[in-house]
Amino acid sequence: MEPESPSSSEPAVTTCYRHPKVESYVRCTRCERFICPDCMRDAAVGHQCPECVKEGARTVRQARTAFGGRISAVPLVTYALIGLNVVAYVAELLREQVVDDFAMLGRGLLGPDGLQYVWQSAYPSDFRLEGVIDGEWYRLLTGAFLHLPPTEGTFGILHIVMNMVTLWNVGRIVEAQLGRARYLALYLLSALGGSVLVLLLAPDTSTVGASGAIFGLCTAYYVLARRLGADPAGINRFMAGLLIWLVISAVVTSWQGHLGGLLTGGLIALGLAYAPRDRRRVLVQAGTCAATAALLVVLALAKAAQMTT
């Protein structure tokens, strides 16, 4: 009888399927492939490989907020919006012309001396139009990221400070309730709504500030809180204070921008909060945002056409 060779009595060496040079004796509990310590992912029972973990994440239903948005622990959009406003403010401090070039303005005249003048239908040939009437549509949004310089206006630097503090306090709550995409749509459309009402009612006035968007967020906060069954007394006091501030601030600020943001934010919030909680919810919510945006665009185009005739 011939003796057995040493190789026939030794156990077969198994290696990780992702790292063939690494010995492994642990199998993935889903696909049963061998995995090394670097590839092991803790599971309810045993360990899984990275591919099975990814596949499981795709098949597991993700948690949603009460209004259909994805749950996120970090208010990333609020951080980004505050950052954009601060960057724009620094740009204003470095170059004063930024305000003149990007503030919300329906119609105006730019003189040969570089100064801005109130619009009039008849003007010298060396003057030129500026504002939305001259096709500067970007002003409808860029003006919402600018604020009064430190030495100008009634509030000065408090203008941006008050807006950013409110955005920080209210924005984080609304973003957590709506999710990032819905929250961003609400903010931008509220800003646009404020600018459009300025265009309709005060086209000759140059305005800056995130107040229109902030009023939209605050109105949405009220609508969402009511939908969630929050204490009526507390949120009613909040809304009453917001309306009182709307009236008081009208003396020294653009009440048109505030009111436009408030109405737009409230309209969108109603669509987001009271959409049916079934497969139609995303369609209704997206439709509300799209219809509101379309309405604002139509109003702005109609006003621009009126101003050019």
Image: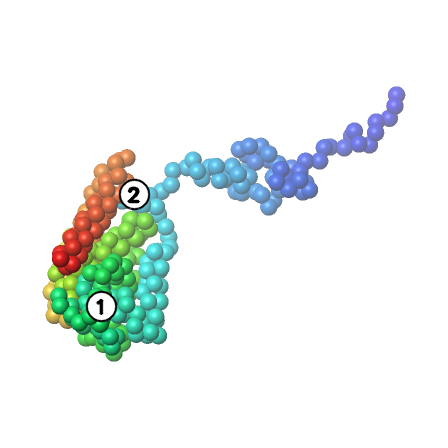
In screen coordinates, is 19 left or right of 275? right
Q: Quadrant of residue 300?
A: bottom left
**Residue 255: x, y in percent?**
14, 64
Residue type indicated by callout 2: Gly
Query: Above or below — where is 47 with respect to 128?
Result: above
What residue sits right under mark 2 in the picture?
68
**Residue 81: x, y in percent?**
32, 60
Q: Nearer the viewer, residue 263 or 234?
A: 263
> Can you name the residue that lies furthest to the right here?
1
Residue visible at 28% across and 35% down in the picture: 279
Secondary element under disc 1, as helix, strand or loop, is strand
Residue type indicated by callout 1: Arg
Count of numbered circles in the view: 2
Question: Can residue 259 be seen in the rendering of this structure?
Answer: no
Question: Can residue 85 be seen in the rendering of this structure?
Answer: yes
> Can you name the residue that lies furthest to the top here?
1
**Residue 216: x, y in percent?**
21, 56
Q: Disc 1 vs disc 2: which is toward the camera? A: 1
Give the colouring mode of the picture: rainbow
In screen coordinates, is 33 left or right of 111? right
Q: Quadrant of residue 20?
A: top right
What residue sits right under mark 1 in the picture?
128
Secondary element under disc 2, as helix, strand or loop, is loop
Q: Quadrant of residue 62?
A: top left
Image quarter where the N terminus lies is top right
Image quarter where the C terminus lies is bottom left
> Can you name the residue that lies furthest to the bottom here?
151
**Residue 201: x, y in percent?**
12, 61
Label 1 crowd (10 A; few <14 / some 14-19 / many >=20) = some
Residue visible at 58% across and 32% down in the picture: 32
Query: Above or below — where is 22 with respect to 305?
Result: above
Residue visible at 86% across and 26% down in the picture: 3
